[in-house]
Amino acid sequence: MIAGRDLGLTGLPNARDLGGYPAAEGRSVRAGLLLRAEALTNATPEDIGALVEMGVGTVVDLRGESEIAMFGVGPWTGPRAHVPTTDLTQALFARMMSAGPDGEPLAEDEVSKVMIDMYRHFVADESSRAAYAEALDLVTEQVSQGTPILFHCTAGKDRTGWLSAIVLTALGADRDTVLEDYLLTNQRATEGRGAPARAKLLALLRQLVGDRQPIAPLLDVRREYLQAAFEEAETKYGTFDAYLRKALGANIDRLRAAALL
């Protein structure tokens, strides 16, 4: 199969399968088991039917309470686990409003720095660490039962991107492979059915940070964002493996036994 396979869901253009990527010991990630997406609020009835047909057991929602209050949980009626990692609305607004002096708009590179700091926060903040540990445990438990799991945030790019990076690295994927999957979001967001979702994200971000702030760094995923989270983990814990095992309590052997071919 093609790694990073598009699930073909009409209302979820960024939904994809982590199956097919090369992993530990010459093995590959099992298809149809680890699914990532944006929020399910725009999912059509046919999309939900497809997820049910795929056998998705639990949907893990990484969004904060204010995002859920704003957009709802969508039409999924199956098991759902709410594991808030970072509340996008609070995190971006607070960081961007505090970064500029006297309410002046930031330069574009300063907005990029806000995003880099947010990715470091995924690792350094204790509540975020605990949330990612919980999410990884849910993923491991679900796939160990042979049941597909889907995890998402709002746009399916930052928090979902970091959890995908954690899972793929735990499975033995190399850094280039992890970045390849992460950067697919830019392609999915701008092509075909991704355009309406991108327009909605743009409207949300404008609502959060105002009309004067540069917004391009908030819309995309960028290599340096993900690398910042990896660097934070390796600086704080010595190695990424130590971050997985000590900070997140990863059961790597169990995860690999279930998710690799």
Image (cartoon, rainbow, N blue to C red):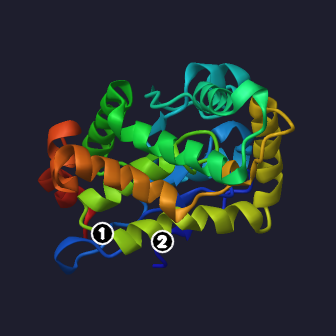
Q: Position of residue 207 (x, y in %)?
A: 81, 31
Mark 2–mark 1 Cα distance, whole angstroms, equals: 11 Å
* Residue at (82, 32) in percent of width and height: 210
* Residue at (65, 46) in percent of width and height: 111
Q: Position of residue 105 (x, y in %)?
A: 78, 38
Amino acid type assigned to the residue bearing label 1 in the image: Ala
Residue 122, above or below 187: above
* Residue at (64, 47) in percent of width and height: 110
- Judge the density around disc 1: few (<14), some (14-19), many (≥20) Cα neighbours within 10 Å: many
* Residue at (24, 52) in percent of width and height: 234
Instruction: Quadrant for residue 114, please give it.
Output: top right
> Circle 2 sits on which residue?
180
Front residue of this view, candidates 87 and 18: 87
Q: Secondary structure at mark 2?
A: helix
Label 2–label 1 contact, CB within 8 A: no
Front residue of this view, candidates 196 and 78: 196
Q: Position of residue 30 (x, y in %)?
A: 33, 66
- The quarter of the image holding the N terminus is bottom left
Amino acid type assigned to the residue bearing label 2 in the image: Glu
Mark carried by residue 173: 1
Q: Position of residue 36 (x, y in %)?
A: 50, 52
Q: Secondary structure at mark 1?
A: loop
Is residue 185 in view? yes
Instruction: Quadrant for residue 102, please give it.
Output: top right
